[in-house]
Amino acid sequence: MDAREIRIKGIVQGVGFRPFVYRLARRFDIKGKVLNDTEGVLIFAEAELARIDSFIRAIRDEAPRPAAINEILSHSVEPTGASDFTIVPSEHAEGEVTSMSPDIATCENCLAELFDIDDRRYGYPFINCTHCGPRYSIIRGLPYDRPQTSMAIFEMCDDCRTEYEEVLDRRFHAQPNACELCGPRYSLLDGAGEPVKCSDPIFEACNMLSDGKVVAVKGIGGFHLMADATNPATVEILRDRKRRPSKPFALMVRDIGVAKMLCEVSDAEADELGSPAAPIVLLKLRKNPAFELPSSIAPGLDQLGLFLPYAPVHYLLFAATGLPCLIATSGNRRDEPIACDNDEVVRDLQGIADAFLVHNRDIVGRTDDSVGFIFEDNLILVRRSRGYVPKSSELPLSGPPVLATGADLKGCFALTRRKDAFLSPYLGDLTGEKSVELFEEVLERYLSWLKVKPEALVCDLHPDYMSTVLAEKYSNQWGVPLYRIQHHFAHALSVMAEFNLPDEPCLAVALDGHGYGGDGTIWGGEFLLTRYDEFERLGHIFQVPQLGGDKAAIDTRRMALSWLYAAFGEDALQRVPKLFENLGGEADLLLDIARRNLPPTTSSTGRLFDAVACLAGICCENTFEGECPQKLMAAVDFSEKNAYDFAITSNILDPRPVITQIIADIESGVSANIIAAKFHRGLAHGIVEMAAKLCDEHSLTGILLTGGVFQNRVLLELVVNGLRKRKLKPHWNRSIPPGDAGVALGQALFGINKLRADDRDNS
């Protein structure tokens, strides 16, 4: 008889892992016990060694759907002569807890019961088990037990209690376990927030959706504004009420079949759509979809953001309406966090929603839907929230706890514990009071859960970022050091952190809209020699004035004029005169700023995309972030194999020759689609040439691709393939967003490294 202590680390608590291990132990005739503790799941197994080995393989191969095993360790121990296998109470040293589970999409077993007329939970919109349902969104405190959740007020009936206590039941210790008799319920409010008398609130809401109304629906992490996506008039009404002229709407589709009717869906994309996280996946629109959607769903774009139902109520909505797809956009006003409270949603969305489908279970942790796209069969997250938080990311270094406050756009912080970094959900832009309140609320919860006190803070160099202001506040309040890090350096470190790359020099290509450079200019097209503790700016895109400062990020004619002046000098206004007609006298003022090369000047790749999109006649206003670059990408004609020629002089990637080539093509009647293709190919070639040159000069092979511009899958593919042809090794953000929501992870790595260095210096 042999005995082993088996340690399992990862997302293994709150996902039915102990009952799963118990069932496996009975199958393999293993004696011993299993428990949760501060590091994960701990098993003591006694049997013949061959059976224990088979048992361990089965744990890895058959783990519950929502579990994520990071590591399985085992070593020999003395047998105790156990006569059976038991589940024992959790052990948490000093209240510390292990990784926590995110919210999980409804599983197949629960879905079958939901529509089984003979099942006692038939049609119950809160059906769940240990393999699915809310986690993060209902947790008030840890360890994760029912009294520590927003389910505490719902006393289980006898049948639910029996399931909860039966170790072989699928609902053993499923903390949200409930039924129609004892659990939460939905109700319907009219547009003024007054109760609607009806026998079935969900069915009544479905009637409203079918009639072209907009309904705010409370789900897992917050409210969706939902509407019939096939009704053009309804789409326009929602756009008008939400003051959202052209930003694409996400669509929830009935099933994977509908997704394939509308979009090209690869096996990898289908897998992500149906995964426990159930993110919104950006998919290529079919040229001839099986049915037409209003063009106003995603005007000017060639992709749709689709996701599948992930909460029981979503399935019930589709069953009752019979609609193939619903608009399911975040229930909020522009630039504010998603609403999650019943009173809050009526106050904030009155005048937008015609009715409110609410329930009486509190959402403790609000989360927006996560968004991503597939590249080389892997998901690249653009927005990391529901389904992924609060999963931790393992850092290359272990050290004292650090709080990194991230950037201002796409707010997200990182709190570390030893080697683990816990990123917050997407918090919205920290330019609004509600987003700042949410930042502090979520931070307080994380500090309580993780039982850590940060020994340092890390923030962006930009002095006016709210994330910087918050970092300064907490640094003073806690009496700990504050480290500041340049924006694009943090982007680069986020890739090194995500892939656990060693502290060896890499070339980072960091391309985005803007970041404070520390030299009085705006950066955004950077080639950085990067290590954990420092960077060197080896090269960048040619800098031009950002005419009107932040206004140029919205009215992109300003950047078009700036680049025209850089390329043509005093003839700039005459090259595309119609573009600047309604600027009037302001055009001459802007031209004078360009002539005098007044600050702020910028190397921003995002602003270059803006300028090209505007010059090509595709889009001249960003009514939402990244609108012009997205429409430029959508316009690419892939049959065009030619490219514009960027110049490289003294490690400056110079687009001025490209601007002259674009104007020549415009004057020759070349289509915007060809211009878009030649620009993407030319920029990718220029990036690869610059990177290869710098790698050769500095004996480097590792490349870090990061920044919001690399959310452009056309550019990403061209650059990755080009670098590989040069025998270089590119890494790019995947599970951590390449945009500003990923900055906090790089800041966290920098902070831990600084603390360790300071400790060495002081010892």
Image: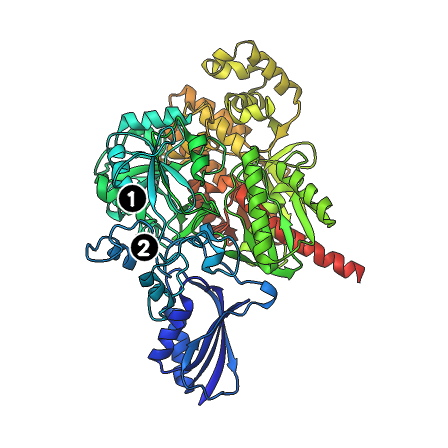
Give SS at disc 2.
Answer: loop
Whether 620 is drawn above or below 342: the answer is above
Splitting the image into 4 quarters, where does residue 94 fall?
bottom right
Report, in whole angstroms, how far the alpha carbon at label 1 lies from the one at label 2: 39 Å
| Amino acid at the residue labelled 1 | Glu
Q: Which residue is mark 2?
A: 179
Whether 589 is drawn above or below 249: the answer is above
Quadrant where the N terminus is found in the figure: bottom left
Q: Report the residue at 69% width, 32% height from top.
A: 520
Quadrant where the C terminus is found in the figure: bottom right
Q: Nearer the viewer, mark 1 or mark 2?
A: 2
Q: Is residue 233 left or right of residue 605?
A: left
Across and down, in percent, residue 414 comes to 58, 50
Q: Report the residue at 45% width, 13% height from top.
A: 578
Across and down, in percent, residue 27 comes to 33, 78
Q: Which residue is mark 1?
A: 264
Whether 72 is drawn above or below 597: the answer is below
Across and down, in percent, residue 53 comes to 41, 80
| Disc 2 packing (10 Å; few <14; some 14–19; many ≥20) | many
Q: Earlier in the sequence, mark 1 or mark 2?
A: 2
Across and down, in percent, residue 633 comes to 41, 35
Whether 275 is drawn above or below 536: the answer is below
| Disc 1 packing (10 Å; few <14; some 14–19; many ≥20) | some
Give SS at disc 1.
Answer: strand
| Front residue of this view, candidates 702 and 640 | 702
Q: Report the residue at 60% width, 55% height from top.
A: 416
Q: Is residue 616 left or right of residue 507?
A: left
